[in-house]
Every structure is written in C-alpha cells, then in structure tokens.
Image (cartoon, grey):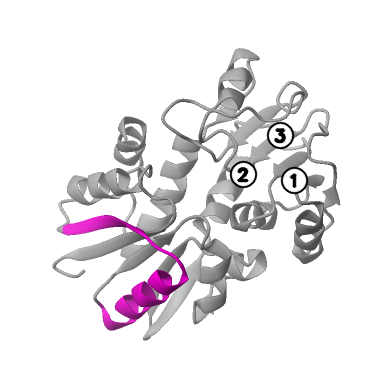
Amino acid sequence: MKAEIRLVLLGDPVGHSRSPAIHRAALASLGLAGSYEARRSGHAGLLEAIEELKTGALDGINVTMPLKTTAATVADRLTELAARSGSVNTLRAREGEAEGHSTDAAATKTLLEGTRFDVSAPILVLGAGGAAAAVITAIEGRSVYLSSRSEQAARELATRAGHEVVVVPFEEPVPGAIVVNATPIGMNGEPLPAGLVEGASGLVDLAYGRVDPPSTVRARALGLPVVDGIEFLALQAAESFSWWTGLEAPWDVMLVAAKNG
C-alpha cells in the first residue's frame, strides 16, 4: 500500500457530489493517508487524469455523468462488466495501463440478487446513458424493459445488451416492475412520469439532490422497498474502494458519510 492514496472524481457537474465525503471517511476509518478530490472535467480532463493514473500520480478515478461511456472508450482494458455495458465509472492502473470497471453494474447486481426485492419481478430501467447501460448489464434471467425520452437511444442500448430487452414508451408503466431510475430526473426535485412509481413493486433511484426526489418520497409512502440515490452511491463507492485498495470497504462508515453529505 502506498504511503498516500490519491483519488479523484471527474464529471460535470460534480459540485453536488457526496463521493469526496464518502471516500475521505473510508480512508480515515482505516487509518490510511490520502485524498479524494472532485474535478469538474470534460473529455480533455479525463485524458489528463488517465495519464496521471498511469504515471502513479493518481491511484484511482471515479467517473460520473457525462463521461461514463467516454471512459469506456479511452481505457486501455475493461473488466467483463464494463466491457458488456460499454460504461466505466471507476479506473485504476494495472501493469502500466488504465483499467476500467463499472461499480454501478456491480452494485445493481448485488441489490437485485439480494432479499430486498422480489427476485421474480420484471425490471423497468429508465434512461439510455452509461448508468442505464451498467444496470442493464447487471440483470440476468429476468424480464427487462427499457424506457428513455430518446427512443432511438433506448433501442440502440437494447440491441447492445446481450439479452432480450423490451423497449417501451417513456411514460408507460410496467405493472409490478422494479423501477430503476438511471436518469438525472429527481436531482432538482422533478417527479418521474405519473404512474411509474404507483404501478411498481419497488424502486431503485440513482438520482439524488439536496432533498429526496419526489419519486423516492412517493415510493416510501406507498410502502414499496426502496434504494435511494444516497444508498446506491455508497454501495457503488464501497465497490470502488475495495477494487482500488484490495481492502474490505468500511460500509457502515461510508453510508453514514453519504447521508451526511
């Protein structure tokens, strides 16, 4: 283990992100010297950070919107989950190369195969970007529906999925489905289209903001099982931390930090 671990988050926007607090708390909990900073970055900033990774100036990179698909194209190698999804939210150096991984996919797989949700329920994924691609990749042996405001983008993602995915209109509910919101809807207090949550059997909402998204509030009021954006953020962060360091992530500490922001 290096004397000091340097980690960064890249994307735009990143000012709202709770990732720095989460990873700094993890480092402190394990007595590790290090830092985690957020950089507002586009394509050029991503390439610069990858060079820092290869030279050892950085030990790990997290990537958020809108760079997840770009990161998958510029990484030198990909894990199986990242290659299947075409989405990368975590990078590390391996044998002088930048290796990309999708802890979004890993976290989704853990959640949907756990005990919180009905394992036989269909899945309705909202979105067609990098996060949605990661979620689609993680789902195996289930009925999967995909919905996006861009029907063309949804159909392209469905074609790449490697298993059957049914594209449905964006505002159309799928009765009894676990809704996975992989769009930014809710970050600024916007509700999901009417009927999506009301017809669901559960909600995994990747969006989070200064207040709880209306969809999360509504799902809880209906008594549905819910994983909100804060919990999902902490879960994928724990996956990233372990992948970078080889250590067991201090999950409880990271979840508290995520909630406290």
Residue kind at label 3, given as amino acid type: Ile
Q: Quadrant of residue 178?
A: top right
Q: Report helix, strand or loop for mark 1.
A: loop
Q: Contact (CB < 8 A) between labels 2 and 3?
A: no
Q: Nearer the viewer, mark 2 or mark 3?
A: 2
Image disc number at residue 183: 2
Which residue is located at x 31 percent, y 63 percent? 245
Image disc number at residue 66: none
Image position of 258 with respect to 104: above or below: above
Callout 1: few (<14), some (14-19), or many (20+) C-alpha neighbours within 10 Å? some
State the CA–CA distance, disc 1 to disc 2. 10 Å
State the CA–CA distance, disc 2 to disc 3. 15 Å
Image position of 260 with respect to 249: above or below: above
Say which residue label 1 marks: 149
Q: Which range is magenta?
A: 34-56
Residue kind at label 1, given as amino acid type: Arg
Q: Contact (CB < 8 A) between labels 1 and 3?
A: no
Q: Quadrant of the N terminus?
A: bottom left
Q: Report helix, strand or loop for mark 2.
A: loop
Say which residue label 3 marks: 178
Residue 224 position, x and y percent, is: 64, 21
Residue 128 position, x and y percent, is: 69, 53
Q: Report helix, strand or loop for mark 3.
A: strand
Instruction: Tell me if 234 is positioned left or right of 103 in this view.
Output: left
Which residue is located at x 53 percent, y 38 percent? 207
Residue 147 position, x and y percent, is: 77, 45
Which residue is located at x 20 percent, y 45 percent? 29
